[in-house]
């Protein structure tokens, strides 16, 4: 018996980009000349192995080929080149709705999915109550799934996938839907799954979960396998990938080098803006009187790199560069963080910190640097920055950028609530007299 549950050998997936339906027809009959149609390589000679009982994570930016390789492993797609070997029964949760008939009830879909996984009716009967208890969607199990909310849908889909006793479980971002209590129940099931010596293949943008649950991680980038190794090193590599600092992106390296050189030389008007290293929210809430303008900003991690992925427990910086178009007395520079629900979690400003610049003149540029410890729980947050002040006793916003970009906090230890109080815990046994 092989020690490997999954072996992916030199796998490529190529899509042909037809401009017209006639081109597709001609190609089907072999009438098109080689190279006449543009090709897109979703995967490019990717190889990796997953040992039995191992939890392997796959990470990469959007379009890197993560979901494509999972679909090839599960048989949803066929590879253009290469081989895939599977040793064990697979249960996969690839995307919301995959394998479900929208007209069937929840119960009917349980039997449909169980049958597709190779179970008999009697075997599904024996597991049915456990599946329904895990999903916990009440009488909706007797209603067509087309009437389900997204949260109810993923509850049932995950309950089926995890409770049919697969030897290999494959999950692709499925837990981004559902409330926090259900997610906690799913992750507990992951731990039970690992303790039973079963195999887990996990794709997620949640780097905290990748670091916590995976024994090994593969990093994909634009269809290529960039690296594989322990979670800590691969998450660090992925963070650099997000800001184009990997060897696979020469343009990104040049951009970073130019930016660093500009800072070192003291140039005020660098051709490379700090904010070019981040994905800006296209729906940023921007407003103000225009007397001051935030012309640049940066998030700097504990290693001094441009990155909006910050490891919990490290010290980092948020920089805000402001150009003043008019003279202003004691402008206030602000920085705050929201969760994805829009609740302001924490923040500060130069007034609270007793850093008052006094009277600034038109044409002046100031950089406010907020250096702080990251003790928010692992997850996604939104950064807001602004320049405000008081005129004749009234509050004025000169320029505000609300939810300008995301900050991902990477953590392998979360506590209860919004932030970690960095507690030191001792446990002492009291001996009886």
Image (cartoon, rainbow, N blue to C red):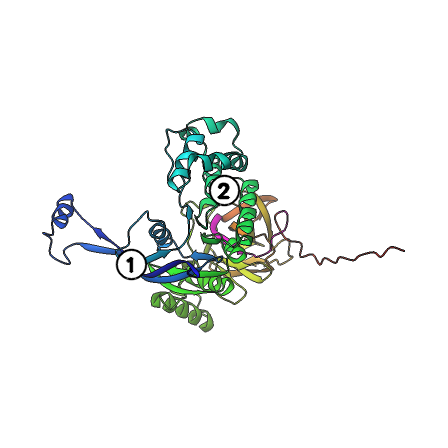
Q: Which residues are magenta?
A: 401-417
Percent x, y of residue 356: 61, 57
Name the quadrant of the N terminus: bottom left
Residue visible at 35% across and 66% down in the picture: 248
Q: Quadrant of residue 344?
A: top right
Percent x, y of residue 42: 30, 55
In the picture, measured across the screen, residue 241 lies left or right of residue 424, that is: left
Placement of 430 over or under 188, stated as above or below: below
Which residue bears the numbered disc 1? 12
In the picture, measured across the screen, residue 9 lies left or right of residue 411, that is: left
Rounded to the nearest angstrom, the CA distance separating label 2 from label 1 is: 32 Å
Percent x, y of residue 232: 51, 63
**Mark 2 or 1: the one toward you:** 2
Q: Give the camera-side residue of 362 and 414.
A: 414
Placement of 173 over or under 212, stated as above or below: above
- Whichever of labels 2 and 1 marks the residue nearer the N terminus, that label is 1
Placement of 189 over or under 146, stated as above or below: below
Which residue bears the numbered disc 2? 163
| Neighbourhood count class around disc 2 (C-alpha, 10 Å): few under 14, some 14–19, many 20 upward | some
Percent x, y of residue 97: 39, 38
Q: Is residue 19 magenta?
A: no
Task: Identify the element where label 2 is drawn.
Answer: helix
Residue visible at 32% across and 47% down in the picture: 76
């Amino acid at each position: 018996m092989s020690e490997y549950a999954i072996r992916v050998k030199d796998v490529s997936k190529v899509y042909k980009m037809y401009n017209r339906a006639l081109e597709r027809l001609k190609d089907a009959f072999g009438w098109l000349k080689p190279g006449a149609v543009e090709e897109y390589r979703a995967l490019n000679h990717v190889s990796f192995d997953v040992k039995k009982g191992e939890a392997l994570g796959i990470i990469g930016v959007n379009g890197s080929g993560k979901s494509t390789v999972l679909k090839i492993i599960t048989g949803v797609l066929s590879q253009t080149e290469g081989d895939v070997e599977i040793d064990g029964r697979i249960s996969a949760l690839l995307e919301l709705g995959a394998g479900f008939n929208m007209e069937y009830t929840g119960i009917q879909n349980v039997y449909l999915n169980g049958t597709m996984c190779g179970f008999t009716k009697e075997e599904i009967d024996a597991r049915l109550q456990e599946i329904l208890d895990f999903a916990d969607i009440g009488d909706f199990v007797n209603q067509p799934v087309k009437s389900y909310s997204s949260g109810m849908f993923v509850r049932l889909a995950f309950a089926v996938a995890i409770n049919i006793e697969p030897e290999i479980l494959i999950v692709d971002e499925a837990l981004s839907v559902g409330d926090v209590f259900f997610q906690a129940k799913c992750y507990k099931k992951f731990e039970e799954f690992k303790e039973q010596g079963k195999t887990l293949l996990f794709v997620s943008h949640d780097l905290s979960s990748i670091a916590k649950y995976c024994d090994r991680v593969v990093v994909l980038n634009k269809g290529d396998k960039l690296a594989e190794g322990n979670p800590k090193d691969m998450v660090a590599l992925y963070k650099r990938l997000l800001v184009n600092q990997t060897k696979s992106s020469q343009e990104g390296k040049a951009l970073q080098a130019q930016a660093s050189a500009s800072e070192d030389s003291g140039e005020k008007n660098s051709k490379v803006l700090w904010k070019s290293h981040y994905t800006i929210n296209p729906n940023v809430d921007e407003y103000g009187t225009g007397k001051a303008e935030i012309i640049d900003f940066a998030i700097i991690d504990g290693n001094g790199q441009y990155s909006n992925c910050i490891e919990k427990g490290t010290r980092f910086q948020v920089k805000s560069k402001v150009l003043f178009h008019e003279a202003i007395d004691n402008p206030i520079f602000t920085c705050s963080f929201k969760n994805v629900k829009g609740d302001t979690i924490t923040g500060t400003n130069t007034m609270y910190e007793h850093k008052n610049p006094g009277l600034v003149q038109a044409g002046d540029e100031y950089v406010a640097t907020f250096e702080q410890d990251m003790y928010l729980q692992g997850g996604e947050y939104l950064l807001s920055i602004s320049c405000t002040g008081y005129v004749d006793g009234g509050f004025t916003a000169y320029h505000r950028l609300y939810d300008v970009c995301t900050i991902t906090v990477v953590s392998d230890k979360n506590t209860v609530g919004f932030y970690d109080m960095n507690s030191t815990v001792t446990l002492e046994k009291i001996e009886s007299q």
